[in-house]
Amino acid sequence: MVAASTKPGKELDLDYELLTRVLDVLPDPVFVKDEQHRWVAFNDAFCAFLGKTREELLGRSDYDFFPKHEADVFWEKDAIVLAGKGTNENEEELTHASGVRHILCTRKSSFTMTDGRQRLVGIIRDVTERRRMEVQVLETERLVAVGTLAAGVAHEINNPLTYVTCNIDHAVALLDQLEAERGSAAVAELRACLADAADGTRRVAGIVADLRTLARPHAMQKDADVAMPLVAVDLQAAIQASLRMVNLVTRHRARVDVGPKIQELPAVAAVEPRLCQVLVNVVANAAHAFGNDNPTRNLITVDAEVGTDTVEIIVRDNGPGIAPARLARILDPFVTGGSGMGLGLSISVGIVRSFGGSLRIASDLGVGTSVRVKLRRVSPVSEADERARESADPHASPSREHAAVSTKRCVLVVDDEPMICKLANRILSREFDVVIASSAAEALAAIEKKSPPFDAVLCDIRMPGGSGLDLWANVRERWPSLAKRFVFATGGVDSTALEERLAATGQPWVGKPFPPEKIIDALTRIAKR
């Protein structure tokens, strides 16, 4: 029922009773203030919203329950309405007694009673979640736009970056050979120049790799429980990429220290961009907890604990900590430990659970907060398992008799970029006999003619007239064993569908630009003799 300081006359009792029932049925909080800005009437929803009883609220004002700076704003706007200057509708921020901030849409009007006194009637609608969702939608749209741009930039850069990087590495190898044979001061100077150039390309490659991770749409997907194929993820690389991406947030707020165990971590079962999303969110939350003051004192540490079946990433900060009441709800949507939307942690929990892992948070006020992300280790495939996968077909591994005759294994390189083909021939020719195909159709023709069969296939994914994945599917139907010896090369996996198809093959892939030794190692491993 409505609480009021006075009741109307007996002849209006029926109308008063009806009015109070109607107001109490309304889901939105409704209140009435007098000329001294005190609450003189309100409905049940108003009491529930403030978490107070009628006795606690009746005759009290905003200053009794809200921070002074907020109460000052309410008073100023109420005064305009009480002065008879019309209806006022606006958004206001209110800090609840629990410490949670709300965004309110409040409509206020004044009316004059029969004795000439002014009253203010206010209706409140809590739009906190709606406003936060609108901000989240706008942010997601912005990230999607950035991701689309990043995908195009990464793909266009990676091909030229690949042959620049690999040619530099190949030139350095040739210089080593030349210096060993002849010796020359000029060789040392040339090597220094190439080393500087190689360092520059590595930096560009790191930027492109981070852009490529950002470009994958499901990295920003809110429904973290959608099933995605899990693959073996290089955890150390994922942590380093995440720290680079969040560097703009952390560097002005805190020092980030990486523990020694991070340098040697086993692979984990995950989806790389989603794992990076979790790590970025956790580290960014730690940075935001500090605010902007005294970055030299503020410290974030990233370390790991490696178990028999799991790896636990631990992110600690020496920030202000989280109050127990809020810590109990910290993984709920829109609840934060400091600033920010609060959606990140709830989404991160869903992502980690989809990996078969867990996320836990502990905090002490005045001491700091720690977040533990536990992930499943990936067991290495044994040689026995590899041998069990081999099956007999016309393109099975060459016989021992053939191996004794041939001094080199034969690799088919499939790529529509002429410079990549030229580069592949240059860096692989010492270890392999190389056959080049510039399209899927040329590759199929080469496979049909080759006897004995190819030992391995290095295949680009994106090609006009038929993708590398289409080629692989065709080969799997006709020559299953050869399909098991594919290594894919890609300038970027920028869509969920593409990543699903790539993961479904079960074949290894390398991202451009790749160091020569990495591609040689991948081909050597997969080419069975």
Image (tube, rainbow, N blue to C red):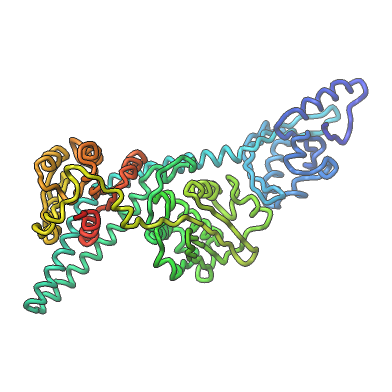
Q: Quadrant of residue 119?
A: top right
User: Residue reaching furthest left?
Assistant: 182
- Please report the residue visible at 59 percent of the width from the left and 40 percent of the height from the top: 129
Residues 283 and 457: in front is 457
Q: Quadrant of residue 17?
A: top right
Q: Horizontal and vertical percent for residue 291?
A: 55, 60
Would residue 132 be found to the left or right of residue 21 on screen?
A: left
Q: Is residue 311 above or below residue 460?
A: below
- Please report the residue visible at 11 percent of the width from the left and 72 percent of the height from the top: 177
- Please report the residue visible at 9 percent of the width from the left and 57 percent of the height from the top: 406
Q: Is residue 325 above or below residue 197?
A: above
Q: Horizontal and vertical percent for residue 104?
A: 64, 39
Where, quadrant-wise, is the N terminus in this rendering? Answer: top right
Q: How many marks?
A: 0
Residues 522 and 319: in front is 522
Residue 164 appearing in the image: yes
Q: Is residue 374 above or below residue 24?
A: below
- Please report the residue visible at 44 percent of the width from the left and 44 percent of the height from the top: 220
Q: Horizontal and vertical percent for residue 303?
A: 48, 66
Residue 423 appearing in the image: no
Where, quadrant-wise, is the C terminus in this rendering? Answer: bottom left
Q: Is residue 13 above or below residue 431?
A: above
Would residue 147 be found to the left or right of residue 353 on screen?
A: left
User: Residue reaching furthest front?
Assistant: 401
Would residue 313 be found to the left or right of residue 514 on screen?
A: right
Q: Horizontal and vertical percent for residue 433?
A: 10, 55
Would residue 298 be found to the left or right of residue 435 on screen?
A: right
User: Residue reaching furthest right?
Assistant: 10
